[in-house]
Amino acid sequence: MKCAPLHELALVTMGTAPPGDTYNSDGRGMPMIAGAGDYGDIHPTPKKYTTSPLAVAEPGDLIVCVRATIGDLNWADRQYCLGRGVAGIRPRNGRADLRYLSHVVASNKGWLNAKGTGSTFPAIRKADLEGMPVPLPYPEDPKRSLAEQKRIAAILDKADAIRRRRHEAARLTEQLIPSLFYDMFGDPGRNPKGWPTRNIGRLTTLVTSGLTPSGGAQVYVNEGPYFIRSQNVLMNRLDFSDAACLPSEIHESMSRTKVAVGDVLLNITGASIGRIAWVESLDREANVNQHVCIVRLDQEQAAPEFVSVCLSLPWGQQLIIRTETGALPQGLNHKQVRQIEILYPATKLQHEFAKRIREVRALQRAHETQRRESNAMFDSLVQRAFRGEL
Protein backbone atom coordinates (compact mmCIF):
# COMPACT_ATOMS: atom_id res chain seq x y z
CA MET A 1 0.00 0.00 0.00
CA LYS A 2 1.05 3.57 -0.63
CA CYS A 3 0.72 6.07 2.20
CA ALA A 4 -0.74 9.56 2.27
CA PRO A 5 -0.39 12.07 5.12
CA LEU A 6 -3.50 12.42 7.24
CA HIS A 7 -4.04 16.07 6.29
CA GLU A 8 -4.74 15.02 2.68
CA LEU A 9 -7.60 12.80 3.86
CA ALA A 10 -9.06 14.49 6.92
CA LEU A 11 -9.62 17.79 8.65
CA VAL A 12 -7.71 17.95 11.95
CA THR A 13 -9.09 20.37 14.55
CA MET A 14 -6.75 20.96 17.47
CA GLY A 15 -8.40 21.72 20.78
CA THR A 16 -8.17 25.12 22.43
CA ALA A 17 -8.85 25.88 26.09
CA PRO A 18 -11.78 28.28 26.53
CA PRO A 19 -11.48 31.26 28.90
CA GLY A 20 -11.37 30.02 32.48
CA ASP A 21 -14.36 32.06 33.59
CA THR A 22 -16.61 30.24 31.09
CA TYR A 23 -16.25 26.82 32.77
CA ASN A 24 -19.07 25.32 34.82
CA SER A 25 -20.22 21.96 36.17
CA ASP A 26 -23.97 22.47 35.99
CA GLY A 27 -24.57 21.81 32.30
CA ARG A 28 -24.55 25.34 30.89
CA GLY A 29 -23.25 25.58 27.36
CA MET A 30 -21.31 22.81 25.60
CA PRO A 31 -19.68 19.78 27.28
CA MET A 32 -15.90 20.01 27.17
CA ILE A 33 -13.31 17.29 26.57
CA ALA A 34 -9.98 18.26 28.15
CA GLY A 35 -8.23 14.92 27.74
CA ALA A 36 -8.48 11.18 28.32
CA GLY A 37 -9.86 11.82 31.81
CA ASP A 38 -13.10 12.79 30.08
CA TYR A 39 -13.22 9.64 27.94
CA GLY A 40 -15.71 6.82 28.31
CA ASP A 41 -15.42 3.35 26.81
CA ILE A 42 -16.65 4.65 23.44
CA HIS A 43 -18.14 8.12 23.92
CA PRO A 44 -16.93 10.92 26.21
CA THR A 45 -18.19 11.38 29.76
CA PRO A 46 -17.41 15.09 30.30
CA LYS A 47 -17.22 16.67 33.74
CA LYS A 48 -17.23 20.34 32.75
CA TYR A 49 -19.05 22.63 30.36
CA THR A 50 -18.19 25.94 28.74
CA THR A 51 -20.31 28.76 27.43
CA SER A 52 -17.57 29.85 24.98
CA PRO A 53 -16.29 26.86 23.00
CA LEU A 54 -13.40 27.75 20.70
CA ALA A 55 -12.87 24.38 18.96
CA VAL A 56 -15.77 22.01 18.36
CA ALA A 57 -16.16 18.33 17.45
CA GLU A 58 -19.33 17.41 15.59
CA PRO A 59 -21.32 14.17 16.13
CA GLY A 60 -19.47 11.27 14.51
CA ASP A 61 -16.03 12.89 14.71
CA LEU A 62 -13.06 10.94 16.03
CA ILE A 63 -11.49 12.50 19.13
CA VAL A 64 -7.80 11.77 19.71
CA CYS A 65 -5.60 12.68 22.68
CA VAL A 66 -2.65 14.86 21.72
CA ARG A 67 -1.30 15.38 25.24
CA ALA A 68 -0.21 12.93 27.98
CA THR A 69 -2.00 9.74 26.81
CA ILE A 70 -1.27 10.48 23.16
CA GLY A 71 -3.30 8.48 20.65
CA ASP A 72 -6.19 7.44 22.95
CA LEU A 73 -9.50 7.57 21.06
CA ASN A 74 -13.17 8.32 21.65
CA TRP A 75 -16.12 9.04 19.36
CA ALA A 76 -18.22 12.19 19.51
CA ASP A 77 -21.91 11.36 19.96
CA ARG A 78 -22.84 15.08 20.10
CA GLN A 79 -21.12 18.42 19.85
CA TYR A 80 -18.18 18.80 22.21
CA CYS A 81 -15.81 21.61 22.96
CA LEU A 82 -12.28 20.35 22.37
CA GLY A 83 -9.80 21.36 25.07
CA ARG A 84 -6.10 21.61 24.39
CA GLY A 85 -5.46 17.95 25.29
CA VAL A 86 -7.43 16.58 22.34
CA ALA A 87 -8.05 17.02 18.63
CA GLY A 88 -10.91 16.15 16.31
CA ILE A 89 -10.57 14.21 13.05
CA ARG A 90 -13.16 14.37 10.26
CA PRO A 91 -12.75 12.93 6.73
CA ARG A 92 -12.76 15.28 3.75
CA ASN A 93 -12.58 15.03 -0.03
CA GLY A 94 -14.40 11.67 0.07
CA ARG A 95 -11.09 9.78 0.16
CA ALA A 96 -11.18 8.23 3.64
CA ASP A 97 -13.49 6.20 5.84
CA LEU A 98 -13.37 7.41 9.45
CA ARG A 99 -13.63 3.91 10.95
CA TYR A 100 -10.63 2.95 8.84
CA LEU A 101 -8.77 6.07 10.00
CA SER A 102 -9.53 5.20 13.63
CA HIS A 103 -7.71 1.89 13.24
CA VAL A 104 -4.80 3.64 11.53
CA VAL A 105 -4.50 6.13 14.39
CA ALA A 106 -4.72 3.33 16.99
CA SER A 107 -1.99 1.37 15.22
CA ASN A 108 0.22 4.48 15.14
CA LYS A 109 0.16 5.26 18.88
CA GLY A 110 3.83 4.41 19.18
CA TRP A 111 4.70 6.60 16.19
CA LEU A 112 2.69 9.51 17.59
CA ASN A 113 4.15 9.15 21.08
CA ALA A 114 7.65 9.30 19.63
CA LYS A 115 6.75 12.75 18.30
CA GLY A 116 5.72 13.98 21.76
CA THR A 117 7.71 16.73 23.45
CA GLY A 118 7.53 18.20 26.94
CA SER A 119 8.97 17.02 30.24
CA THR A 120 5.82 16.93 32.37
CA PHE A 121 3.10 16.04 29.86
CA PRO A 122 4.40 15.13 26.39
CA ALA A 123 2.29 16.56 23.59
CA ILE A 124 2.23 16.45 19.81
CA ARG A 125 1.68 19.36 17.44
CA LYS A 126 -0.93 19.68 14.73
CA ALA A 127 1.78 19.09 12.13
CA ASP A 128 2.70 15.80 13.81
CA LEU A 129 -0.86 14.49 13.67
CA GLU A 130 -1.49 15.80 10.17
CA GLY A 131 1.73 14.20 8.98
CA MET A 132 0.81 10.72 10.23
CA PRO A 133 1.12 8.28 7.29
CA VAL A 134 -2.11 6.55 6.30
CA PRO A 135 -1.82 3.37 4.18
CA LEU A 136 -4.25 3.64 1.28
CA PRO A 137 -5.52 0.69 -0.75
CA TYR A 138 -5.88 1.47 -4.47
CA PRO A 139 -4.87 5.15 -4.10
CA GLU A 140 -5.20 5.67 -7.86
CA ASP A 141 -8.93 4.88 -7.69
CA PRO A 142 -10.63 6.90 -4.86
CA LYS A 143 -13.98 5.13 -5.18
CA ARG A 144 -12.42 1.66 -5.01
CA SER A 145 -10.09 2.80 -2.25
CA LEU A 146 -12.98 4.00 -0.11
CA ALA A 147 -14.89 0.74 -0.59
CA GLU A 148 -11.81 -1.27 0.36
CA GLN A 149 -11.24 0.89 3.45
CA LYS A 150 -14.81 0.20 4.56
CA ARG A 151 -14.31 -3.54 4.03
CA ILE A 152 -11.09 -3.56 6.04
CA ALA A 153 -12.62 -1.42 8.79
CA ALA A 154 -15.59 -3.82 9.08
CA ILE A 155 -13.21 -6.78 9.58
CA LEU A 156 -11.15 -4.89 12.16
CA ASP A 157 -14.29 -3.66 13.94
CA LYS A 158 -15.50 -7.24 14.37
CA ALA A 159 -12.11 -8.37 15.66
CA ASP A 160 -11.97 -5.39 18.01
CA ALA A 161 -15.47 -6.20 19.31
CA ILE A 162 -14.30 -9.73 20.14
CA ARG A 163 -11.28 -8.29 21.91
CA ARG A 164 -13.44 -5.87 23.92
CA ARG A 165 -15.79 -8.68 24.97
CA ARG A 166 -12.81 -10.68 26.22
CA HIS A 167 -11.62 -7.67 28.23
CA GLU A 168 -15.10 -7.14 29.65
CA ALA A 169 -15.37 -10.82 30.61
CA ALA A 170 -12.08 -10.55 32.48
CA ARG A 171 -13.27 -7.40 34.27
CA LEU A 172 -16.58 -8.96 35.28
CA THR A 173 -14.84 -12.09 36.53
CA GLU A 174 -12.69 -9.91 38.79
CA GLN A 175 -15.90 -8.54 40.34
CA LEU A 176 -16.94 -12.06 41.31
CA ILE A 177 -14.48 -12.05 44.22
CA PRO A 178 -16.07 -9.29 46.35
CA SER A 179 -19.55 -10.46 45.30
CA LEU A 180 -18.77 -13.96 46.56
CA PHE A 181 -17.54 -12.54 49.87
CA TYR A 182 -20.69 -10.47 50.39
CA ASP A 183 -22.84 -13.47 49.49
CA MET A 184 -21.17 -15.77 52.00
CA PHE A 185 -20.37 -13.39 54.85
CA GLY A 186 -22.42 -10.23 54.35
CA ASP A 187 -21.19 -6.64 54.48
CA PRO A 188 -18.45 -6.50 57.15
CA GLY A 189 -19.43 -2.95 58.07
CA ARG A 190 -22.94 -4.04 59.13
CA ASN A 191 -22.04 -7.64 59.98
CA PRO A 192 -25.63 -8.85 59.49
CA LYS A 193 -24.67 -12.45 60.30
CA GLY A 194 -23.16 -11.50 63.64
CA TRP A 195 -19.67 -12.95 63.08
CA PRO A 196 -17.19 -12.53 65.93
CA THR A 197 -14.04 -10.50 65.30
CA ARG A 198 -10.40 -11.20 65.95
CA ASN A 199 -7.26 -9.14 65.46
CA ILE A 200 -4.66 -10.17 62.90
CA GLY A 201 -2.00 -10.78 65.54
CA ARG A 202 -3.96 -13.71 67.02
CA LEU A 203 -4.13 -15.42 63.63
CA THR A 204 -0.50 -15.13 62.52
CA THR A 205 2.83 -16.84 63.02
CA LEU A 206 4.77 -13.90 61.54
CA VAL A 207 4.22 -10.20 60.79
CA THR A 208 7.27 -8.51 59.32
CA SER A 209 8.55 -6.44 56.42
CA GLY A 210 11.79 -6.36 54.50
CA LEU A 211 14.36 -3.76 53.58
CA THR A 212 16.12 -2.39 50.54
CA PRO A 213 19.63 -3.85 50.25
CA SER A 214 22.62 -1.53 50.40
CA GLY A 215 23.11 -0.13 46.93
CA GLY A 216 19.42 -0.10 46.09
CA ALA A 217 18.51 -0.72 42.48
CA GLN A 218 22.17 -1.06 41.52
CA VAL A 219 22.29 -4.54 43.07
CA TYR A 220 19.26 -5.84 41.12
CA VAL A 221 19.92 -8.59 38.60
CA ASN A 222 18.08 -9.86 35.53
CA GLU A 223 17.47 -13.34 36.97
CA GLY A 224 17.13 -14.40 40.58
CA PRO A 225 14.64 -14.41 43.45
CA TYR A 226 11.85 -11.85 43.10
CA PHE A 227 12.19 -8.66 45.12
CA ILE A 228 8.56 -7.72 45.72
CA ARG A 229 7.91 -3.98 46.02
CA SER A 230 4.69 -2.08 46.60
CA GLN A 231 4.01 -1.73 42.86
CA ASN A 232 3.90 -5.52 42.60
CA VAL A 233 1.12 -5.81 45.20
CA LEU A 234 -2.21 -5.01 43.55
CA MET A 235 -5.61 -5.55 45.11
CA ASN A 236 -5.99 -9.31 45.63
CA ARG A 237 -3.43 -9.91 42.91
CA LEU A 238 0.34 -9.94 42.57
CA ASP A 239 1.92 -8.62 39.39
CA PHE A 240 5.47 -9.82 38.74
CA SER A 241 5.70 -8.30 35.25
CA ASP A 242 8.14 -5.61 36.41
CA ALA A 243 9.42 -7.28 39.57
CA ALA A 244 13.04 -6.65 40.43
CA CYS A 245 15.33 -9.62 41.12
CA LEU A 246 17.95 -10.06 43.82
CA PRO A 247 21.27 -11.89 43.74
CA SER A 248 20.87 -15.20 45.56
CA GLU A 249 23.41 -14.29 48.25
CA ILE A 250 21.46 -11.12 49.19
CA HIS A 251 18.20 -13.05 49.20
CA GLU A 252 19.71 -15.65 51.53
CA SER A 253 20.97 -12.92 53.86
CA MET A 254 17.36 -11.69 54.17
CA SER A 255 16.09 -15.07 55.33
CA ARG A 256 13.51 -13.70 57.76
CA THR A 257 11.60 -11.98 54.96
CA LYS A 258 11.52 -14.81 52.45
CA VAL A 259 8.03 -15.08 50.99
CA ALA A 260 6.06 -18.32 51.14
CA VAL A 261 2.99 -19.50 49.25
CA GLY A 262 -0.02 -18.60 51.39
CA ASP A 263 1.49 -15.39 52.77
CA VAL A 264 -0.66 -12.28 52.70
CA LEU A 265 1.28 -9.22 51.49
CA LEU A 266 0.14 -5.76 52.59
CA ASN A 267 1.48 -2.40 51.45
CA ILE A 268 2.17 -0.40 54.59
CA THR A 269 3.57 2.91 53.27
CA GLY A 270 3.03 5.46 50.54
CA ALA A 271 0.20 6.12 48.11
CA SER A 272 -0.59 2.41 47.75
CA ILE A 273 -0.99 1.80 51.49
CA GLY A 274 -3.68 -0.83 52.03
CA ARG A 275 -3.27 -2.75 48.80
CA ILE A 276 -3.28 -6.39 49.75
CA ALA A 277 -2.93 -9.79 48.05
CA TRP A 278 -2.21 -13.36 48.97
CA VAL A 279 0.60 -15.39 47.42
CA GLU A 280 -1.22 -17.94 45.31
CA SER A 281 1.88 -19.47 43.76
CA LEU A 282 5.55 -18.72 43.08
CA ASP A 283 7.70 -19.85 40.19
CA ARG A 284 10.84 -18.91 42.15
CA GLU A 285 11.84 -17.74 45.61
CA ALA A 286 10.94 -14.20 46.64
CA ASN A 287 11.60 -11.49 49.20
CA VAL A 288 10.03 -8.12 50.07
CA ASN A 289 11.23 -4.59 50.68
CA GLN A 290 10.37 -2.31 53.60
CA HIS A 291 7.14 -1.06 52.04
CA VAL A 292 5.55 -4.53 51.98
CA CYS A 293 4.48 -6.39 55.11
CA ILE A 294 4.35 -10.18 55.22
CA VAL A 295 1.33 -11.44 57.17
CA ARG A 296 1.90 -15.16 57.62
CA LEU A 297 -1.27 -16.76 58.88
CA ASP A 298 -1.75 -19.92 60.88
CA GLN A 299 -3.89 -21.52 58.20
CA GLU A 300 -5.58 -23.78 60.70
CA GLN A 301 -7.11 -20.59 62.06
CA ALA A 302 -7.55 -18.41 58.97
CA ALA A 303 -7.54 -18.70 55.18
CA PRO A 304 -5.24 -16.23 53.36
CA GLU A 305 -7.84 -15.67 50.64
CA PHE A 306 -10.47 -14.72 53.23
CA VAL A 307 -8.20 -12.28 55.08
CA SER A 308 -6.98 -10.61 51.88
CA VAL A 309 -10.43 -10.16 50.36
CA CYS A 310 -11.93 -9.01 53.66
CA LEU A 311 -9.34 -6.25 54.01
CA SER A 312 -9.55 -5.30 50.32
CA LEU A 313 -13.22 -4.29 50.67
CA PRO A 314 -14.06 -0.63 51.42
CA TRP A 315 -14.70 -1.56 55.07
CA GLY A 316 -11.30 -3.24 55.32
CA GLN A 317 -9.51 -0.35 53.64
CA GLN A 318 -11.02 2.04 56.17
CA LEU A 319 -9.75 -0.19 58.97
CA ILE A 320 -6.25 -0.03 57.52
CA ILE A 321 -6.03 3.73 56.99
CA ARG A 322 -8.10 4.88 59.99
CA THR A 323 -6.29 7.17 62.42
CA GLU A 324 -7.48 9.27 65.34
CA THR A 325 -7.33 12.43 63.21
CA GLY A 326 -8.97 10.81 60.21
CA ALA A 327 -5.93 11.61 58.09
CA LEU A 328 -4.17 9.13 55.87
CA PRO A 329 -1.21 7.72 57.81
CA GLN A 330 2.29 7.89 56.37
CA GLY A 331 2.72 4.23 57.18
CA LEU A 332 1.74 1.33 59.38
CA ASN A 333 4.08 -0.42 61.77
CA HIS A 334 3.93 -4.12 62.57
CA LYS A 335 2.12 -3.51 65.86
CA GLN A 336 -0.64 -1.63 64.06
CA VAL A 337 -0.96 -4.40 61.50
CA ARG A 338 -1.35 -7.00 64.26
CA GLN A 339 -4.07 -4.86 65.87
CA ILE A 340 -6.26 -4.74 62.75
CA GLU A 341 -9.49 -6.51 63.69
CA ILE A 342 -11.41 -8.46 61.08
CA LEU A 343 -14.49 -10.64 60.91
CA TYR A 344 -13.80 -14.15 62.09
CA PRO A 345 -16.29 -16.71 60.75
CA ALA A 346 -15.63 -20.41 61.26
CA THR A 347 -12.35 -21.53 59.68
CA LYS A 348 -14.18 -24.25 57.76
CA LEU A 349 -16.33 -21.58 56.09
CA GLN A 350 -13.25 -19.48 55.32
CA HIS A 351 -11.65 -22.45 53.56
CA GLU A 352 -14.85 -23.08 51.63
CA PHE A 353 -14.60 -19.46 50.47
CA ALA A 354 -10.95 -20.06 49.52
CA LYS A 355 -11.97 -23.09 47.44
CA ARG A 356 -14.49 -20.99 45.52
CA ILE A 357 -11.90 -18.27 45.01
CA ARG A 358 -9.56 -20.82 43.44
CA GLU A 359 -12.35 -21.70 41.02
CA VAL A 360 -12.74 -18.01 40.17
CA ARG A 361 -8.99 -17.76 39.64
CA ALA A 362 -9.12 -20.68 37.21
CA LEU A 363 -11.87 -18.87 35.31
CA GLN A 364 -9.79 -15.68 35.33
CA ARG A 365 -6.81 -17.53 33.88
CA ALA A 366 -9.01 -18.89 31.10
CA HIS A 367 -10.32 -15.40 30.35
CA GLU A 368 -6.79 -14.01 30.42
CA THR A 369 -5.64 -16.62 27.90
CA GLN A 370 -8.59 -15.74 25.66
CA ARG A 371 -7.83 -12.04 26.08
CA ARG A 372 -4.21 -12.49 25.03
CA GLU A 373 -5.25 -14.62 22.07
CA SER A 374 -7.82 -12.05 20.92
CA ASN A 375 -5.23 -9.26 21.28
CA ALA A 376 -2.74 -11.24 19.22
CA MET A 377 -5.37 -11.98 16.58
CA PHE A 378 -6.33 -8.32 16.36
CA ASP A 379 -2.72 -7.13 16.15
CA SER A 380 -2.05 -9.65 13.38
CA LEU A 381 -5.12 -8.51 11.44
CA VAL A 382 -4.08 -4.86 11.74
CA GLN A 383 -0.59 -5.59 10.43
CA ARG A 384 -1.98 -7.62 7.55
CA ALA A 385 -4.59 -4.98 6.79
CA PHE A 386 -2.07 -2.19 6.40
CA ARG A 387 0.23 -4.38 4.32
CA GLY A 388 -2.64 -4.99 1.91
CA GLU A 389 -2.97 -8.68 2.82
CA LEU A 390 -6.60 -8.83 4.02
Image: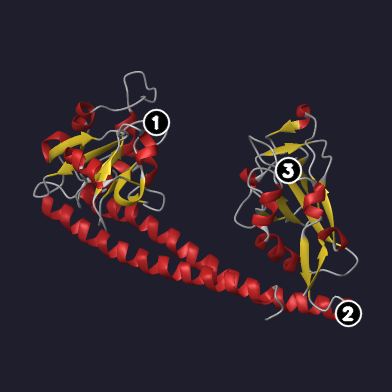
Residue type (three-letter) at the residue carrying disc 3 = Pro
The quadrant in which the N terminus is found is: bottom right
Rendering coords of residue 317 (x, y %): 34, 37
**Of residues 76 and 281, the one drawn nearer to the viewer in this rendering:** 281
Q: Is residue 196 left or right of residue 292?
A: left
Rendering coords of residue 132 (x, y %): 77, 58
**Of residues 358 and 246, the one drawn nearer to the viewer in this rendering:** 246
| Secondary structure beneath label 3 | strand
**What residue does disc 1 label?**
270
Front: mark 3 or 1: 1
Q: In this rendering, does residue 129 appear at all?
A: yes
**What residue does disc 3 label?**
31
**Label 1: how many residues lie within 10 Å, few (<14), some (14-19) or many (20+)?**
some
Q: Residue at coordinates 15% horizontally, 44% vertically from top-left?
A: 297
Q: Earlier in the sequence, mark 2 or mark 1?
A: 2
The quadrant in which the C terminus is found is: bottom right
> Do the residues bearing badges 2 and 3 touch, measured as CB atoms within 8 Å?
no
Rendering coords of residue 203 (x, y %): 12, 40
Establish if 25 lies above or below 390. Answer: above
**Of residues 272 and 45, the one drawn nearer to the viewer in this rendering:** 272
Q: Is residue 261 left or right of residue 34?
A: left
| Secondary structure beneath label 2 | loop
Q: Distance of mark 3 from mark 1, alpha carbons?
A: 36 Å
Q: Residue at coordinates 60% horizontally, 56% vertically from top-left?
A: 41
Looking at the rendered structure, which numbered label has been put on residue 141?
2
Establish if 319 lies above or below 242. Answer: above
Residue type (three-letter) at the residue carrying disc 1 = Gly
**Label 3: how many residues lie within 10 Å, few (<14), some (14-19) or many (20+)?**
many
